Amino acid sequence: MLRNEGRGSTPAGDLDEELPFLGVKPASESRPDRRQSGGTPNVLVLLACVLCTIISVAIAISAPSIQYQNTTHEVRLRRPSQYIGLDKVNRTVPGVVPPDPLVNHPPTLTQVSRKQPTKVFSNHPRRFYSHIGGMIYPEDRRFLVTDDVHSIAQFRVLDFGMELCSIVIAVPAVHEQLAANKTATIGPGMTALIHVFRLDADNEQFFDAARLSWRTRPKRHSKQPMATLTVEAGTSAATEKFDCLEASARAFVRYDSPFVFESGPAI
């Protein structure tokens, strides 16, 4: 075995013997004993950690719990209009044809249960996880009306000048349901009576569907329904036209006869 050392190196023992002649203490004497001095800082660090833990636990116990407001609409909607200058366009020119009505589907369509006042229904009951695209939210929605379950829908008016609205409930025929993989169930007689109420909610805010339940639902705007619709398979029913301002959110509740409909574009 061959041990290589750099040139000019001096063994550690010889260096310690030469240092006293130069008036310098050997490194072995000036180096502190770590075994004797290293215990105290470790104990102090441990005590500091324990003290911080005790203080954190005490603060967490003594601090008041967070109180959430009993509300279901928190997201503000009001924003500058993207239709800049359209309000100054002259629309009285002869021959101008007004646009056809647009179909506006509710971004929020969920249910609340009278028998389960704290239950929160999913706004996307058909969602599923895909390893390719992550969480998938199909357009299929559920419109459910029973003696105890009411459906709440909220629409958002987006289009410029389209401020006259009507709620339409369209139920496809049986053969259309089978072809489009949709399901509709109506009570006895294949006819359902749907009462539509306008909700007393802020027109500039969206519901928080993750917290919407029977207990937190908005109150009705009036005791009388704004419309009563009779629906059956293969037909559609619509309310009277009403004003709906641009960039506003309109909320409605529907209930009466047992009626279940699961679909995307039909409501």
Image: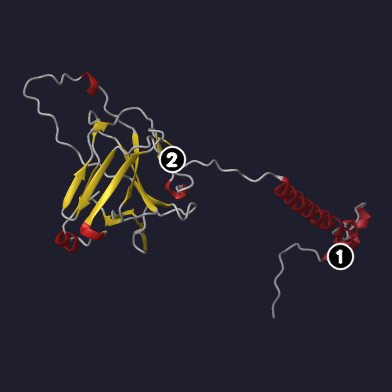
Counting from the top left corner in percent of width and height, residue 219 is at 43, 39
Q: Between residues 255 and 96, which one lies in front from this camera angle?
A: 255
Q: Residue at x 91, y 55 (%)?
A: 25
Identity, as a three-letter code, of the amino acid under mark 1:
Asp
Q: Which mark is residue 175?
A: none
- Labels in figure, total: 2
Q: Residue at x 44, y 52 (%)?
A: 114
The quadrant of the image that shows the N terminus is: bottom right
Q: Are marks 2 and 1 in contact (CB under 8 Å)?
A: no
Identity, as a three-letter code, of the amino acid under mark 2:
Pro
Compared to 211, does 83 lie above or below?
Answer: above
Q: How is the image coloured?
A: secondary structure
Tell me which corner region of the image, top left, top right, bottom left or bottom right, holds residue 73.
top left
Q: Residue at x 73, y 52 (%)?
A: 57
Compared to 193, does 39 lie above or below?
Answer: below
Left-right relation of 249 to 2 = left
The residue to which callout 1 is attached is: 14
Mark 1, other Cα within 10 Å: few <14 / some 14–19 / many ≥20: few
Counting from the top left corner in percent of width and height, residue 210 is at 45, 49
Secondary element at tag 1: helix
Compared to 258, does 195 lie above or below?
Answer: above
Q: Residue furthest left?
A: 95
Q: Between residues 61 and 57, which one lies in front from this camera angle?
A: 61
Secondary element at tag 2: loop
Q: How far separated are the C-alphas under marks 2 and 1?
A: 91 Å
Counting from the top left corner in percent of width and height, residue 110 is at 37, 50
Counting from the top left corner in percent of width and height, residue 103 is at 21, 42
Q: Nearer the viewer, mark 2 or mark 1?
A: 2
Whether residue 183 appears in this view of the structure is no
The residue to which callout 2 is attached is: 218
